[in-house]
Structure formats: structure tokens, C-alpha cells
Image: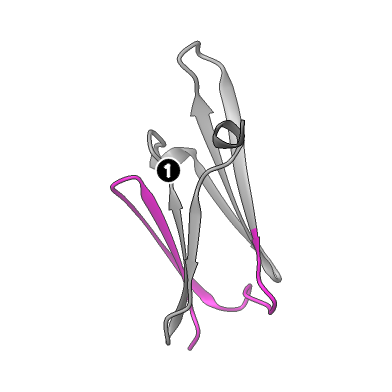
């Protein structure tokens, strides 16, 4: 059940950025929605099943500090969405 409702994410904290990576196989770039509010990052994806039904999967990452003011960059390649929050 869990695999059907959420997707895998990894977090890392190198020196100059906070990195969130989401594994999104079979997802198109235009079906990804990213939103940032104060201390949270939300990733929503829309998928169409083999029967033609649409379903939404979502993950929310809460940070222990505000991230909304940080510069954010995104990249989507090889089924991996990479979101970087630049510390400086």
C-alpha cells in the first residue's frame, strides 16, 4: 500500500546546500508540483494508471528552520527530481 501512495525521497546536507531527491519513475516533468511554505517543502505528482484513472501522490518534508527565503533550484533527470536549497 505504501508504494502506491508515496514515493521515495532522500535528504542530504552538504556544506553549501540542502538537497532533497525524489525517485519518480514514470512521471513526466509537467506532472510535478513543488511548493514551499516557511519550513515545509511539498512535492505532488499526478500519475495516470493503466486503467486511465488519475491519482495524486504527495510527500511533505518539514525542516527545523525556515527555507522559504533560500534560493531554490530544481532538476529532473533519469526519473530523479533534485531540489536544492542554497544556504548562501
Residue at 62% across / 44% down in the picture? 58
Task: Depth check: give the residue in front, 7 or 34.
Answer: 7
| Extreme residue toward the top, this view | 51
- Boundaries of the magenta span: 61-88
Task: Depth check: give the residue in front, 68 or 24.
Answer: 24
Residue 38 position within the rendered picture, expressed as x and y whole percent measured from the top left: 71, 70
Position of the N terminus by quadrant: top right
- Up the image or down, 61 lies above or below 18; here it is above
| Extreme residue toward the left, this view | 78
Answer left or right for 62 relative to 70.
Answer: right
Residue at 50% across / 55% down in the picture? 9
Residue at 49% across / 19% down in the picture? 49
The quarter of the picture where residue 39 lies is bottom right
- Up the image or down, 16 lies above or below 34; here it is below
Residue 75 position within the rendered picture, expressed as x and y whole percent measured from the top left: 36, 58
Residue 74 position within the rendered picture, expressed as x and y whole percent measured from the top left: 42, 61
**Local crowd size for mark 1, using a 10 Å CA cut-off: few (<14), some (14–19), many (≥20):** some
Question: Which residue in the protein does label 1 denote?
Answer: 24
Q: Is residue 74 magenta?
A: yes
- Up the image or down, 12 lies above or below 56; here it is below
Which element type, helix, strand or loop, lies under badge 1? Answer: loop
Q: Is residue 77 magenta?
A: yes
Residue 81 position within the rendered picture, expressed as x and y whole percent measured from the top left: 41, 53
Residue at 65% across / 55% down in the picture? 60
The quarter of the picture where residue 56 lies is top right
- Up the image or down, 9 lies above or below 18; here it is above
Amino acid at each position: 500500500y505504501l508504494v502506491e501512495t508515496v514515493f521515495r525521497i532522500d535528504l542530504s546536507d552538504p556544506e553549501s546546500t540542502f538537497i532533497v531527491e525524489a525517485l519518480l519513475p514514470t512521471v513526466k516533468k509537467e506532472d510535478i508540483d513543488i511548493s514551499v511554505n516557511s519550513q515545509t517543502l511539498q512535492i505532488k505528482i499526478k500519475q495516470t494508471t493503466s486503467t486511465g484513472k488519475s491519482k495524486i501522490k504527495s510527500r511533505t518534508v518539514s525542516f527545523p528552520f525556515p527555507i522559504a527565503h533560500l534560493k531554490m533550484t530544481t532538476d529532473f533527470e533519469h526519473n530523479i527530481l533534485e531540489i536544492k536549497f542554497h544556504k548562501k
